[in-house]
Image (tube, helix red, strand yellow):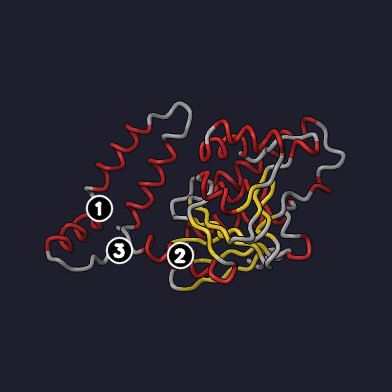
């Protein structure tokens, strides 16, 4: 598929998805969200892709937020549908994906941009990053999972403060709060993301998927995360990757996982 708002590059089993609306600070309009759905769905299904790094074009923004001009004139029913559809089609697709996703946050990650980063499994940021959920300044609240995922990541108190004040935080604070896991210079952001992803995808692919499902299960209402972990643990024993991992360990060699 030809994308108008995304740049897609595959290299060494990693797919780089870059939101390419630099003149608009990579804001999420409906076309970009539709393309993100397609890109991630395709990447998760592509056997040549083992992990995905998501970033924004240019030095100023990862994603500065949603395209607010598209909100004008919407009523309550349309707003509800907007949040439900995009959560289901984009943010939940990423969060529940069977392959690891790292958000490489450069510059502003605000509103829907921070929500997009939080849907990814891991977040790292350059030291010029600014993150926040400013929706209450528009008479809104975060609508793409922000109230839930921020609370899961930083705890209720800090999430309440960030959402209710609409204040931005810098990368150092985001690291302290647990919102991100690494801070780099802007120049080292993508190399660090590649380093981290390369280490991750050297592990057993089916085990990675099982680990993602198990962690997510513990954060899902009505699901017993411990039971999910037990079931996923057991299923791993039926994989060839498990047999290869044990054989490699006992043979004191590097495992060669095939994802089966």
Q: Residues within 10 Å of mark 3 (few under 14, many from 20)?
A: few
**Most foreground residue, 39 or 71:** 71
Work out whether residue 162 or residue 258 is closer to the camera in this orientation and state it.
162
**Label 1: how many Cα within 10 Å (few below 14, some 14–19, many 20+):** some
Q: Name the outermost residue toward the right.
A: 73
How packed is label 2: few (under 14 Cα within 10 Å), some, or many (20 or more)? some
Task: Check contact, mark 3 vs mark 1: CB within 8 A.
Answer: no
Residue at the image position 55 percent from the left and 43 percent from the top: 92
Q: Position of residue 177 (x, y in %)?
A: 53, 43
Q: Is disc 2 placed on a helix, strand or loop?
A: loop
Residue 251: x percent and y percent?
Answer: 12, 65
**Mark closest to the chain's N terminus, 3 or 2:** 2
Distance between the alpha carbons at the discs numbered 3 and 2: 13 Å
Task: Tell me residue 117's x, y (percent).
Answer: 58, 51
Residue matched to label 3: 258
At mark 1, the secondary structure is: loop
* Along the line of sight, the residue nearer the viewer: 165 or 220: 165
* 43 relative position to 144: left or right: left
Alpha carbon separation for disc pair 3 and 1? 10 Å
Determine whether the residue tagged by mark 3 lies in a helix, strand or loop: loop
Query: Nearer the N terminus, badge 3 or badge 1?
Result: 1
Residue 49: mark in rendering: 2
Q: CA distance from mark 1 to mark 2?
A: 20 Å
């Amino acid at each position: 598929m030809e994308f108008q708002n995304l740049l897609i590059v595959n290299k060494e089993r990693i797919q780089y998805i870059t939101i390419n609306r630099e003149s608009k600070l990579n804001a999420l309009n409906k076309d970009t969200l539709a393309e993100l759905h397609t890109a991630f769905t395709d990447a998760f299904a592509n056997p040549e892709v083992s992990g995905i790094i998501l970033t924004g074009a240019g030095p100023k923004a990862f994603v500065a937020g949603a395209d607010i001009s598209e909100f004008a004139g919407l009523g309550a029913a349309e707003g509800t549908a907007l949040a439900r559809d995009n959560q289901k089609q984009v943010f939940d697709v990423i969060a529940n994906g069977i392959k690891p996703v790292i958000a490489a946050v450069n510059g502003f990650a605000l509103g829907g941009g921070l929500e997009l980063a939080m849907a990814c499994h891991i977040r790292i940021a350059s030291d010029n990053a600014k993150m926040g959920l400013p929706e209450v300044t528009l008479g809104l609240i975060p609508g793409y999972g922000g109230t839930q995922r921020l609370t899961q990541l930083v705890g209720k108190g800090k999430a309440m403060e960030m959402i209710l004040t609409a204040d931005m935080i810098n990368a150092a604070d985001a690291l302290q709060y647990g919102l991100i896991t690494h801070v780099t210079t802007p120049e080292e952001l993508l190399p660090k993301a590649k380093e981290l992803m390369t280490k991750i995808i050297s592990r057993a692919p089916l085990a990675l998927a099982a680990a993602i499902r198990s962690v997510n299960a513990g954060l899902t209402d009505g699901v017993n995360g411990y039971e999910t972990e037990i079931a996923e643990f057991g299923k791993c024993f039926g994989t060839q990757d498990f047999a290869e991992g044990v054989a490699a360990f006992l043979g004191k060699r590097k495992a060669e996982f095939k994802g089966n």
